[in-house]
Image (cartoon, rainbow, N blue to C red):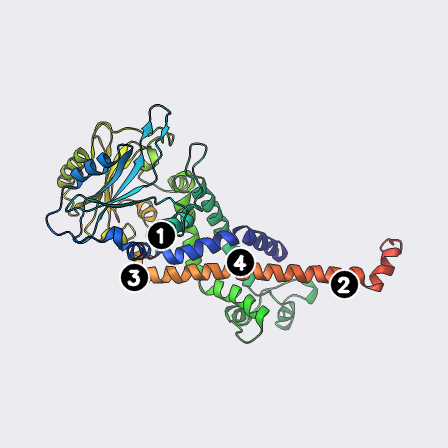
Amino acid sequence: MRLFATLIHRWAGLFIALFLVVSGLTGAVISWDHEIDEWLNSDLYKIESQGEFRSPIDLIKVVEADDPHAQVVYVPLHFEEGHAATYLVQPRIDPATGKPYPLDYTQVFIDPVTAAIVGKRDAGEVSLSRRALMPFLRDLHESLHVPAFWGSDRWGYQFMGIVALVWLLDSFVALYLTLPLRRRQAAVASGGAAAGDGPAPSNGRNWWQRWMPSWRIRWRAGGYKLNFDLHRAAGLWVWGVILVIAFTSFSLNLYREVFFPAMSLVSQVTPGPFETRPRSPLNQPIEPRIGFGQALELSREQAGRQNWERPPGGIFYARNLGFYSTAFFHPGADHGSGGMAIANMYFDGSDGRYLGDYLPWKGTAADIFVQLQFPLHSGRILGFPGRVMMSLMGLVVAMLSITGIVIWARKRRARKQAAWRDASSPVAGRNAALPARDPV
């Protein structure tokens, strides 16, 4: 059993190791994505204008008039003094070709006081420039930046979801391999089974004492032992956090494909339009018949009927699902809460029909469990300390993957050297020349 578990851990670990290095290092950085991005690109985020803010809906016309090939899909409703407003855009479809117009940007930064466009950038650009660094690292972390093909942009997310699932299962195998073997001698000494009867349970205290070395790091024992201890002991100390990260990585990346259907089988989950609406092909977006202004009015009316205290903070139009999602949150709560301070309402883009809502910490136990996936994954459920912890965990995950590769490489080299010595020894050569004998 232990040999089988060792093989599973070896090959599963090698399969996911490089992806976890990338995911861990990028995760350590994107815990602070908004702050770092604003620091790197202060010329896009910071403005000097002072005065009364323009209407967020009116600024849509400014953005789309600047480039008729661009369609606004996200409108921020909270403006901050001294900061530009960020509008998200996607290319319209060229009726002559049936394909999207070429568009070299996805974000437009606009002065909410003067309505002047401050700048633009492509958040999907593969680049380490200061303009694209943080969006690129986030996309790399979530989907390896795999481009859309065969009518879907989900391939990278799905692959990373599979990696996370393998990681989750392998974490249990890794824990098993750290457990001490049961000693036959201990069983005999305690009057248990005879030495030839196989493993037998031993005293719990002795078992714990034999497990304790797995938790220790021998800092002065040499390179190989230090590397091995870092891989084993560090993995033990953070094992519970690793389970949370691996599970939430799987649930977020395979949410629509696996996690939501699986949760629906075992518990009552309230579906929303993201789960139930049919998705159109990427090059066939659903054109809305009502605009952002109407969606905002519908949202305010519905929020008044339901006595929501949060103000509307942003509206997103899901083009391939055909509905508006209005996010309600207090200013500043969108970056630090991990979603647990944001409520949403959904409206059909064709007729304004109310499709339902999402309230954090509300619903069935399964609903709340689903809501907690990203706050747990990002650590934002614990606020600032949680973000610090997840940054450190990103480095730990990368370290565990690298030390695992080193262990495998050294053992592989040792096996090759042993095989070479056996093959080149005189005894091995003479035995190879002798005919094989039947066992006695």
State how far apart marks 2 and 1 are (Cα). Answer: 51 Å
Left or right: residue 291 versus residue 280 is: left
- 421 relative position to 432: left or right: left
Please tell me whether mark 4 sits on a helix, a strand or a loop.
helix
Between circles 2 and 1, the one closer to the viewer is 1
Q: Farthest residue in the top direction?
A: 96
Going from N to C along the chain, the mark reached first, 3 or 1, is: 1
Residue located beneath label 2 in the image = 421
Residue 387 is labelled as none
The quarter of the rendered structure image containing the C terminus is bottom right
Asked whether disc 1 touches disc 4, contact meaning CB atoms under 8 Å apart, the reply is: no
Q: Position of residue 87 (x, y in %)?
A: 25, 42
Circle 1 — which element? helix
Q: CA distance from mark 1 to mark 4?
A: 33 Å
- For badge 4, the amino acid type reads Ala
* Residue identified by numbered label 3: 384
Camera-nearest label, 2 or 4: 2
Q: CA distance from mark 3 to mark 1?
A: 19 Å
Does label 1 or label 4 sit earlier along the sequence?
1
Locate residue 213: give its quadrant.
bottom right
Mark 3 and mark 2: Cα distance apart in space: 56 Å
Mark 3, mark 2: which one is toward the viewer?
A: 2
> Label 1 belongs to which residue?
134
| Residue pointed to by mark 4 | 174
Mark 4 and mark 3 residues within 8 Å of each other at the beta carbon: no
Q: Secondary structure at mark 3?
A: helix
Amino acid carrying mark 1 in the image: Met
Mark found first going from the N terminus, 2 or 1? 1
Query: Which residue sits at x=27%, y=44%?
Result: 363
